[in-house]
Amino acid sequence: MAKCYTKTRVYTNKARQGGNKVSMLMDIKEVDVDIPQKRQRFTIGVVGGGSTLLQHICVFAEAGFEVVAIDVDHHLINLVKKNTVPSADSMLNKPVKKYLEDGRLTIIRDIREAASQSDVIVILVQPLTSQKKKPDYSKIERICKKLGIGLRSGCLVIVASSLGSDVIESLIKETLENASGLKAGVNFGMAYSPLYTRSKILTDDSTTCKMVVGAINKQSQDIACLILGTITKELLIVSDMKTAEAVRLFRDTYENLNIALANELARYCEKAGIDFIEVQSTVNKQRHCYLPTPKITPQEKMNSLYLLLEEAEAVDAKLPLLILARKSNDGILHHTLRLVGNALQACDKPMRRSRISILGVSCRPNEKEFRGSLIKKLVRMMNKKGMHVRVYDPLFSCEELTGMGYPAEKTIEKTVEGADCLVVTIGHDQFKKLKLRKIKFIAKGKVAIVDMAHIISPVEAEREGFVYRGIGRGIWTK
């Protein structure tokens, strides 16, 4: 079984002996990190949680650096102890265990101790969002205070979280400086680079990922580019950290606006008797036009929109289009509930006391990641309507789902048994292989399907005797 360290192991490299001794990172040249063997001299501390932490662990360890994973919620540590390392992609399981076993990776609880051993600190911690859709940076501030206490002179801090404009300058930099007694840009370097790493980060595709870099000064920029240049071939350098923050916000906001447009057009298609998926497929074959797929958007995808609106309010900028986009995306769960109600009505069944089977709690297809998922909120909304809900996701055990507060079943057969309506929320490959005839036999009686993931053919569903509804699929006949 892979070892999980709850305190820092003893480093043998002289550059890292002695805890808070000065890091030599800010004096390095390209020749010092041009091959993996040389990069072993330097330790990168990655602060975060969940699959994002795992992804960044892998890219830096694969590049040759020693990595200290600072697991702020202790979730990864507990799972490693059980030898059940999770990942956003199954290809990460084996590398994470390998890095633990060969000593390239240490997982640690003590943030201060980890900072004292790191030449580079990468902060991945995301701001929380209140019920009023306001960003809450208190968690980031607490972590930065602990990092600051152990911060080494001569190190580099790279912030990679989604943040509002100027948050690095007004909160993170000041917190680190006050806790450490060091000055950013003088005693330690600072940069901002949102690292867009997803499922193919251990393949050649990872080197084609474009990374934005903004820094507090020229030296910080140069060193950040040297470090990040080991994991990607293309860096997009901007004038400062505030600009880099805006790049991240604008990029995510652009995606949010497109999803909001798709969700709105999908609602129109349902009323007009048009199949959005057919329209989308044809539109996207034309040049300079791209329509995304309407869907239940993970919370993390919408957070940037909330952050930008908060910053706009602070500088008295009016952004009515973004407000409408937020309202549209926030309303997707209510729309899901309307589709369920409509489908049940077509089955001559009331919403109250109806038995609903939800398939999927992950926030992305084929990824064991529940953070950011809105399905728990959907379950609560259904319970308030008097529905009896059961949940199944093949990527999670029944015990895991129950521990997260879901009314779960061990098998898909148990989940759909006696169901009045099946709600497919995520497009896992296993769900694409569903045998509708078998599902219909197990469920018994007149059953509805609400497909929010576009994986079930409306024609096939109706041929097998289901009442079908799907987001944007205005082509059902029953």
Image (cartoon, rainbow, N blue to C red):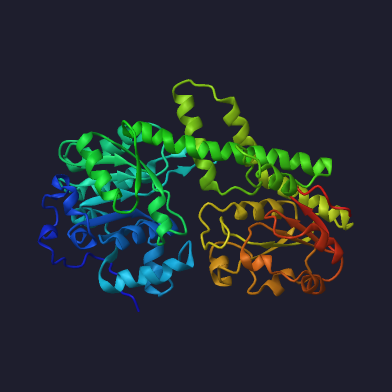
Expressed as whole percent of the image width and height from the top left, the position of residue 228 reads 30, 49
Up-down: is 80 above or below 111? below
Image quarter where the N terminus lies is: bottom left
Expressed as whole percent of the image width and height from the top left, the position of residue 30 reads 19, 49
**What residue is shown at x 17% (from left), y 52% (from top)?**
31
**What residue is shown at x 60% (from left), y 38% (from top)?**
258
Which quadrant of the view contains residue 272? top right
Q: Nearer the viewer, residue 225 or 426?
A: 225
Q: Residue furthest bottom?
A: 1
Up-down: is 290 above or below 21? above
In this image, 200 relative to 467: left or right? Answer: left
Image quarter where the C terminus lies is: bottom right
Expressed as whole percent of the image width and height from the top left, the position of residue 330 reads 62, 41
Visible residue check, residue 73: no
**What residue is shown at x 28% (from left), y 65% (from top)?**
106
Which quadrant of the view contains residue 51? bottom left
